[in-house]
Amino acid sequence: MNNEMDATTVTDANNDDTAAHTVAIGRSMGRWRVLVGRRVLARLAIDNVSPGLDITHIDVLDAVRRAEPKGEVTVGAVAEAMRIDPSRASRIVGDMVGRGLLKRQASQSDARRILLVMTEPGQKLMAEIQAVKRRVIDGILADWSPEDIAQFDRLFDRFVTGFEQLHPPREKE
């Protein structure tokens, strides 16, 4: 019976530790939410690279960049990636086409489909923004060990993936 009590005590202690860590993670998420909500990293990048742009423009470029390896990129794919209404995505894309960051072209497989392609200025802008983000992140991680960085990379990706699953992209109709 002593072994059972010892095991229960250890389990309770582990549960208490887990609960304390969960509370601490929640607090950190609150602080992170303020920074993410204010789009601090994106604003730094825009201020350094292209002050006239809106953060939403960067989100669209990033959505196009992430979708390109999967195949043809449409306004619908951008809307799905950004979890916004297709009509809003269409308006933003139209603005970006006007700025020369994206271009529309007919699909080679189905001429009725209009695809989005990042232009050379769009690619250059995206590369510059990624470089600014990388410098900021590198600065934050400068005093971390390579092991800590690798572990954070793995765990943060796992956490974000779980978070994304709470709000999956809209189903195509």
Image (tube, rainbow, N blue to C red):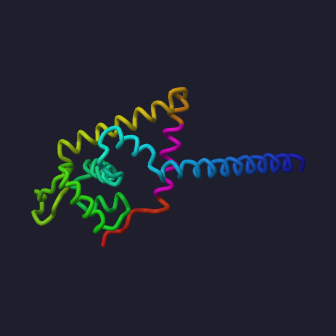
Q: Nearer the viewer, residue 39 or 71?
A: 39
**Position of 11 relative to 106 (above/below):** above
- Name, please, the residue furthest toward the front: 52
Q: Main secondary structure of the magenta part?
A: helix
The residue depicted at 58 percent of the width and 48 percent of the height is 31
Q: Nearer the viewer, residue 76 or 124?
A: 124
Q: Is residue 159 left or right of residue 92?
A: right
Q: Position of residue 1 (x, y in %)?
A: 89, 50
In the image, the segment drawn in magenta is 152-164
The residue depicted at 59 percent of the width and 52 percent of the height is 30
The residue depicted at 29 percent of the width and 38 percent of the height is 127
Q: Is residue 169 left or right of residue 23?
A: left
The residue depicted at 33 percent of the width and 40 percent of the height is 129
Q: Is residue 119 left or right of residue 4?
A: left
Question: Count the marks: how many?
Answer: 0
Q: Position of residue 117 (x, y in %)?
A: 19, 51
**Position of 10 relative to 134 (above/below):** below
Q: Position of residue 161 (x, y in %)?
A: 47, 52
Q: Nearer the viewer, residue 72 or 137?
A: 137
- Name, please, the residue furthest toward the bottom: 173
Image quarter hosting the C terminus: bottom left
Q: Is residue 107 magenta?
A: no
Q: Position of residue 96 (x, y in %)?
A: 23, 54
Q: Is residue 159 magenta?
A: yes
Give the image quarter of residue 122.
top left
**Position of 137 relative to 94 (above/below):** above
